């Protein structure tokens, strides 16, 4: 009986303490897409956002590379997404919190090192905004 009680408590703690993706600047769809002003994200930095899909936080980031082009990525990678920790900016690099691999912010393309790299998502430029289709973010919910 005592062993069952200990096991039940352990399971409850693991479920209650399971990681959830952090909350970043919240963005919403305008019906079919999320639109982010280029003025907001064209400063050479990394900007983190959260889109909510059916109660799940879908985190993504927008960055400007060394040539001034904007790129959109999930705040997750194929290898470490299950830890729900994402990435953090340290000095001039984006760093995976789980495995500590780094990607230089100025690089145009972030090559995969093993399976760890921010998952790139399709975004387009329309009238001064970076546009990400809502369907892209909805499909990405599986990583969060």
Image: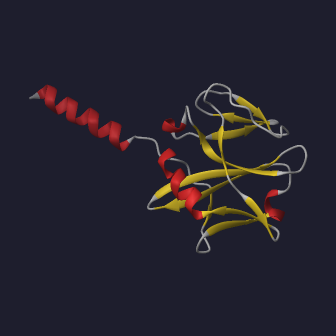
- Quarter of the image for the N terminus: give it: top left
Query: Residue 112 appears at what percent x and percent y?
Result: 69, 30
| Position above or below: 95 against 67 | above
Residue at the spot 79% in from the left edge and 57% down from the top edge: 41
Residue projecting furthest to the right: 67
Residue at the spot 84% in from the left edge and 56% down from the top edge: 42
Query: Residue 69 appears at what percent x and percent y?
Result: 85, 51
Would you say 70 lies left or right of 4 here? right
Query: Residue 140 appears at what percent x and percent y?
Result: 54, 51
Camera-side residue of 95 and 114? 114
Residue projecting furthest to the bottom: 31
Camera-side residue of 53 and 43? 53
The count of marks equals 0
| Position above or below: 140 against 133 | above
Camera-side residue of 10 and 141? 141
Would you say 126 lies left or right of 3 here? right
| Position above or below: 78 against 124 | above
């Amino acid at each position: 009986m005592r062993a069952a009680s200990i096991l039940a408590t352990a399971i409850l703690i693991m479920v209650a303490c399971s990681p959830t993706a952090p909350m970043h600047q919240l963005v919403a769809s305008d019906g079919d897409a999320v639109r982010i002003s280029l003025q907001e994200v064209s400063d050479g930095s990394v900007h983190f956002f959260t889109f909510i899909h059916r109660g799940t936080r879908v985190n993504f980031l927008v960055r400007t590379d060394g040539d001034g082009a904007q790129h959109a990525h999930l705040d997750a990678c194929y290898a470490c997404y299950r830890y729900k920790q994402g990435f953090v900016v340290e000095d001039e690099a984006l760093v995976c919190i789980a495995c500590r691999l780094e990607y230089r912010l100025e690089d145009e393309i972030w090559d995969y090192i093993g399976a760890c790299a921010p998952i790139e998502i399709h975004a387009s430029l329309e009238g001064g905004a970076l546009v990400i289709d809502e369907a892209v973010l909805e499909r990405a919910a599986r990583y969060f």
